[in-house]
Amino acid sequence: MKEESPLIVFDNVTHITDTRHRALDSVSFTINVGEFVTFIGRSGAGKSSLLKHLWAEKKPTSGTVLFDGYHVDRLPSYELPLHRRRIGVVFQDYRLLSHKTAFENVAFVLEAMGESEEVINTDVAYALDLVGLGHVMERFPTQLSAGERQRVAIARAMVHQPDVLIADEPTGNLDPEATHSIVTILKKIHELGTTVLLTTHSKSVVDDIKKRVIIIKDGTIVSDKEKGTYHTEKLEKALHD
Amino acid sequence: MKQPHRIFKSAWQHITRNGTVTFAAVFVLSVTLLIIALLIFTQSVLSFSLEQVAQKVDVNVYFLPNAPEEVVLDVQEQLLALEEVSSVEYVSREDALDAFRERHENDSLTLQALEELGENPLGSSLNIRAFEPSQYEQVAEFISITGPLPTTTQALVEKVNYYQNERIIERVRQAMGSVRRLGMILSIVFGVLSVLITFNTLRLAMYASREEISIMQMVGARRRFVQGPLYMAGMLYGLFAAIFTIIVLYPLTSWMAGQTSAFFGGFNVFDYYVSNFALLSLSLVAAGIILGVISSALALWMYLDK
C-alpha cells in the first residue's frame, strides 16, 4: 500500500462561476493514499464544487488539481473515462436509474467498462453483499427505502474498486439510523484500503468518523485538522454564520 | 465483442421501461411515415391521372385526297423510326369516310351532300402518339416545311393539328412538371418537419435519459457506450413506427380505394399498395430508421456536445 504518498493535490485552486461568484478561493491541500477526509461546511460553502474538480466536471479558473501526479484539468476528453474509473461517487440524491434494478444499477458501471458477464455477476453480488443488500438485488429503486437506495449507490461507486470514493452529502436525506449505517459502511470501505472523501454539514457525522476534518466557508479552507480534532468555534461559525 | 449485445439490451430496456416516451416517439414517427406514404400515393394518383390525360393527346397529320397510299405509309415508317414516337396509326381514306358517315348518321343533309359529290372527298391521315407530351413539338417539326420530308411529300399534307393541340399539350406537360416539382417540395418540407417533430419528441426521450447519460459519463463510460443505446433506441422507434404504419395502411388504402377509385379515373390505391408492398415497406422502414437515427443524433448532440 502506498501509504502517505500524495494522491490528490489542490494547489491554490480558485474557481469563478459564470455569474462571477468565487466558488473556490485559493484552496490548497494534499490528501494521501488511504486517508479518510471529511469536508464540512454549510450548503453553498464550496464542498461539492471542490469535489467536482476531482472528476473533471469543473475546471479551475486558476491553480492546479493533481491526481496521482497528473493534471486533472489538462486531461484530453478521450482520457476522461479512464480517469473517472479511478473514482467512485455517491450523491445525496442517490442518482440511481429508476428503470434498472439494484443489480442492474451496479452492473451498469462494469458494463460501461467492458467487463465480462462472469466478472459482472460475481463483483456486483459481492458489492451488494458488502453494503448488506444481497437480498434485494432484483428490486427497483422505488421499491427500496432511502437508506437502501444510498447503499445501492455506494455499491455502484465501489464495484469497480476505485482508488477514491467520494461521498457528497450521502446522509443528507437520511434519518439518524440510516445515517449511522451509511457511515459504518464508509468506514468499512476505508478499512479495506480505499481513500474516502466525504462532504457533510452534519457535526454528528464528523464526530462519528473521527478522521481528518477540513472546514470550508465561502470557498476557502478555514481549518484542516487531523484525527477528528477540529476547532469547535470555527466549525460552529462555518456551519451557522 | 460484448458491447453490441449490451447496447441492444440497454436500448431494449430503455424502450420497454419508458412506456410513455416510447409510445410518444413511435406515434410521432408513425404519423410522419403515414404522411410520407400518403405523399407517395398522392404523387402516384396525380401521375396516373396526368398520364391518362396525356394519352388522350395526339398529333394528327391529314393528307390531301390525292395523296398516294404508299407515300402516306412511307411517312408512317419514317415517323415510327423517331425515338420520340411511341405509335403511328394509319387511317385510310375509306376508314375516314366510314367514320365520317358514322359520325353524321343522323345528319341526312350532310350525308346527301356527300352522295351528290360522287367521290370520297376525305384524305387519309396519321394519328401520332409520342412517349411524353413534351416530345410532340419535335414530331410536329419533323412534318413541317422545315423538316426532313421531301417537298413533294410536304405538298401532299393538308393539315397538322399539333398547332391546335399545342396549348393543351403544353398545359399537360406543365402540369406534369408542376406535380413532380410539388411532390419533391412537399417531400422535402414534410421530411424537414418530420425530423424536427421527431427530434423534439426524442429530445424529450433523451431528456428523460439525461440522468442516465450524466451517470454514464460520471462512471467513465466511453462515448460509444453512452451513445450506442440511444442511437439503437432511435432506430427501434423508427422500425416499430414503420411496421405500425405498414399495418395501418392496409385497411386505410382499402377504404380509400372505394372512395377515390372512380374519382381518379380508375386508379386503385389499394391495388397500388398491394402490388408495391415490398418496395413501399422497405422505403418506410428505411425512412423510419433514418428519421430515428437523425433525431437521436440531434438530441444527443444537445446533451453530449454542448
Image (tube, coloured by chain):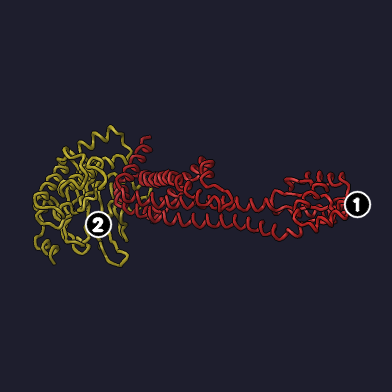
Label 2: state its secondary structure: helix
Label 2 is found on which chain of the structure? Answer: A
- In space, the residues marked 2 and 1 are separated at their CA atoms by 102 Å
Estimate how packed mark 2 is, as few (under 14), some (14 to 19) or many (20 or more) residues with alpha carbons within 10 Å: many
Question: Alpha-carbon neighbours of circle 1 within 10 Å: few (<14), some, or many (≥20)?
Answer: few
Asked if residue A107 can be seen in this view, the reply is yes
Determine if residue A69 is in view: no
Q: Which residue carries the number 1 mark?
A: B152
Residue situated in front as seen by the camera: B189 or A28: B189
Image colour for chain B is red
Q: Up-down: is A13 above or below B97?
A: below
Secondary structure type for disc 1 = helix
Q: Type of residue at label 2?
A: Leu
In the rendered image of this protein, which colour is used for chain A? Answer: yellow
Q: Residue flagged by tag 1: what amino acid is it?
A: Thr
Using residue B57 as the reference point, say whether residue A209 is left or right of it: left
**Chain bearing mark 1:** B
Q: Residue at x 28, y 44 (%)?
A: A86
B38 left or right, relative to A147: right
Image quarter for residue B159?
bottom right
Q: Which residue bears the numbered disc 2?
A: A50
Q: From what the image shows, is residue A21 above or below residue B136?
A: below
